[in-house]
Image (cartoon, helix red, strand yellow):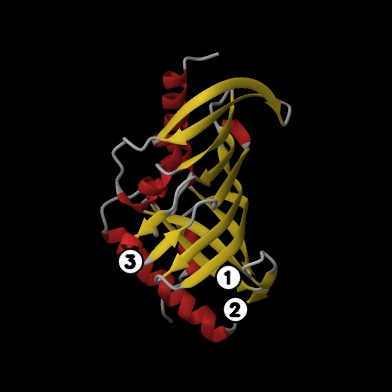
Amino acid sequence: MPEPAILVKEIEAHQRRMDEVQENYTFREITLTDELDPKGAVNGSSSEEHEVFFVNGYRIAHLVKKNGKDLNEGDRKGEQDRIKRLIEKDMKAPPGHSFNRRGENVGVSQILALMKISNPRRITLNGRSTLAFDFVGDNHAKAHGLAENAARKIAGTVWVDEMDRGVARLEARFDDNLRIGGGFVANIQKGTSLIFEQSRLEQGLWMPAVSEIHLAARELLVKGVRRNIHVKDFEFRRFDVGMLQQIAPPPQ
């Protein structure tokens, strides 16, 4: 079994490389959101489908469907204008990276960078030798931004492909409340949980496959929010500049 501290550094470095490789791809992403009542019953659902790509290292999600239906002409024109503005802005900005995504979402890279591991063991997952271990966020680690602050408050288990050092699955839960804006903007409540799964593609590339978020929060000190969010990523293709003309064509 590899020495834990070295293992974490290897996994983190591999994930950063995969994040950067992902920037050379475009893919489809479907997000299904279930709104829950206080008892946990679903009282409304919605879905969005995006074409995701990267410009200068920044993640851009182009909306193509809502609730399973293509956008109407007006919405499609508005979305193309929005995407065009984002592309122009990101082309002028200093280079970014997908692990510093717009919106400061908590992702695998942020969690790996701030974890302390225990109980390493070797298992078989999807027919491949896999290293599994438990982790907690390091409250003493220096955090930059909302995503890393969140990563310090979670605990869970991660499964790592032994040969590639690719993260196959990560389960995490908030063991403490996370106050955003001192609690005046939002309060992500203890018990909120996250699941990330990644799939092995050709040549040892590991790409996001499925994410699930079970969210309990309170917004603006008043409104309670309970949601189940399911995200599926698929149809990965190498990105080329010509795709920008399809996504945000120049004005006629």
Query: Label 3, label 1: how many angstroms apart (C-alpha)?
Result: 20 Å
Image spot of residue 193 (x, y percent):
56, 50
Q: Nearer the viewer, mark 3 or mark 1?
A: 1
Name the one closer to the observer, 45 or 185. 185
Name the one closer to the observer, 116 or 221. 221
Q: Which residue is mark 3?
A: 88
Q: Earlier in the sequence, mark 3 or mark 2?
A: 2
Q: Give above or below for 115 relative to 67.
A: above
For residue 79, the mark is none
Q: Nearer the viewer, mark 3 or mark 2?
A: 2
**Residue type marked 2:** Leu
Q: Which residue appears at 27% of the width and 57% of the height?
A: 93
Q: Give above or below for 103 relative to 25.
A: below
Q: Give above or below for 170 relative to 79.
A: above
As drawn, the residue found furthest toward the bottom would be 74
Name the one closer to the observer, 167 or 36. 36
Name the one closer to the observer, 118 or 103. 118
Q: Which residue is mark 1?
A: 64
Label 1 SS:
strand
Q: Quadrant of residue 241?
A: bottom left
Horizontal side of residue 48 vs 244, given as left or right = right
User: Would residue 175 be visible to someone looking at this image?
Assistant: yes
Q: Quadrant of the N terminus?
A: top right
Q: Which residue appears at 42% of the width and 30% of the height?
A: 13
Q: Earlier in the sequence, mark 2 or mark 1?
A: 1
Q: Are marks 2 and 1 in contact (CB under 8 Å)?
A: yes
Query: Label 2, label 1: how many angstroms apart (C-alpha)?
Result: 6 Å
As drawn, the residue found furthest toward the right would be 127
